[in-house]
Amino acid sequence: MPLGSCEQFASQEVLLQTSTAKPRKIEKMEKPMQPKEGRRTDTATKPRRDTIGVTTKKSFHSAVATLARSRGVAIAALTRDLLQDGIDRFECEMESNNPSSLLRSYEQAATSYDGSETEHWVIRVDRPLAKLVRMTATEFEKSTSQITSFLLAESMRHVPSCDKAKVRDAISENAFIDESSVEDVAREILSVMVPKKSRELAQKVGLRDRRDVLCVVLMGEMLAPSRVVDAVAEEMDVPAGLLMAATRFNFEHRQVPAFKSPSGKPQMLNTPRTWREGISALKLPESEESWLFGLEN
């Protein structure tokens, strides 16, 4: 994600996109490990990532998750971008502002979310970014968790107004969702997974004859664009927030399939795929893949 000037940071809202942008202030970069001769190099180009634990209000974590779902991206990818944007803003703004005052305002942003219940969660970020966050925490005598929560909250303050409205509406809607309702919709989803019903539903929601795409979404294994979620929710006559909660329920309660093979156990996803990752995994013809990618816009 190209970085703007300090003035742009101060005056504009920024639409965060998933990226692999590296932090700006890293003087020493680790040399990538050279694979030994004869070993596979498939993962040699993958960025090495570190885990950062962060404690925030539950409502803040929910806001981040809701924003990710509304954009059809993985929570982990969005969180990395939020953290990168937050540290970039801090570095830019402290050139003309007192860093301690900035951090106090960031802290206020983090504590401004509703409720008092907190939650500890982890994020995985590229190693250079993790090092920069830890160095910043040490420099300003804060814990890594504190600095991370401050930077994330500051970045969330600058997401576009349309995204903020979606997050507000979804959180308000989710406040009235109870567990029994989620399970009822999850069962309803299973009832439409049969070929005839799912094919008809796919046609109605604009997925043409791609019932396979619909089924992957309804089982929670792939994050769908908001236009797809809204269309499915309308056809099933349930709130979009309740539908998304039911797909998460389905994902969390998947059964390991029976599998016999000398090559080992089947691989199950730990987190849902993004729309692009999921569509790519289906190995569809190029024309259909391009059309489905276009539903994100």
Image (tube, rainbow, N blue to C red):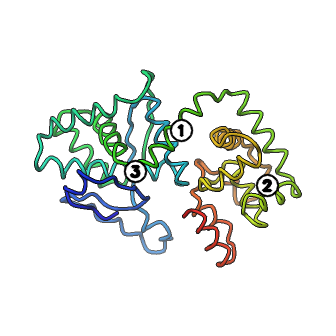
Mark nearer the viewer, 2 or 3: 3
Which of the numbered marks, if any, corresponds to residue 260?
2
Q: Label 3: few (<14), some or many (≥20) within 10 Å?
A: some
Which of the numbered marks, if any, corresponds to residue 160?
3
Query: Helix, strand or loop at disc 2?
Result: loop
Q: Nearer the viewer, residue 96 or 238?
A: 238
Counting residues from the N terminus, which is met first, the one under dot 2 or under dot 3?
Answer: 3
User: Mark 1 near mark 3, Cβ–Cβ under 8 Å?
Assistant: no
- Amino acid type of the residue that numbered disc 3 sits on in the rendered structure: Pro
Marks 2/1: CA–CA distance: 46 Å
Q: Label 1: few (<14), some or many (≥20) within 10 Å?
A: few
User: Mark 2 near mark 3, Cβ–Cβ under 8 Å?
Assistant: no
Counting residues from the N terminus, which is met first, the one under dot 1 or under dot 3?
Answer: 3
Q: Is residue 265 visible?
A: no
Identity of the residue drawn at 70% across and 46% down: 233
Report the number of numbered marks.
Answer: 3
- Counting from the top left corner in percent of width and height, residue 25 is at 20, 57
Q: Which residue is mark 1?
A: 169
- Counting from the top left corner in percent of width and height, residue 102 is at 19, 38
Query: Helix, strand or loop at disc 1?
Result: helix
Drawn side of residue 240 relative to residue 146, left or right: right
Query: Helix, strand or loop at disc 3?
Result: loop
- Amino acid type of the residue that numbered disc 1 sits on in the rendered structure: Asp
Q: Label 2: few (<14), some or many (≥20) within 10 Å?
A: few
- Counting from the top left corner in percent of width and height, residue 52 is at 37, 41
**Quadrant placement of the C terminus:** bottom right
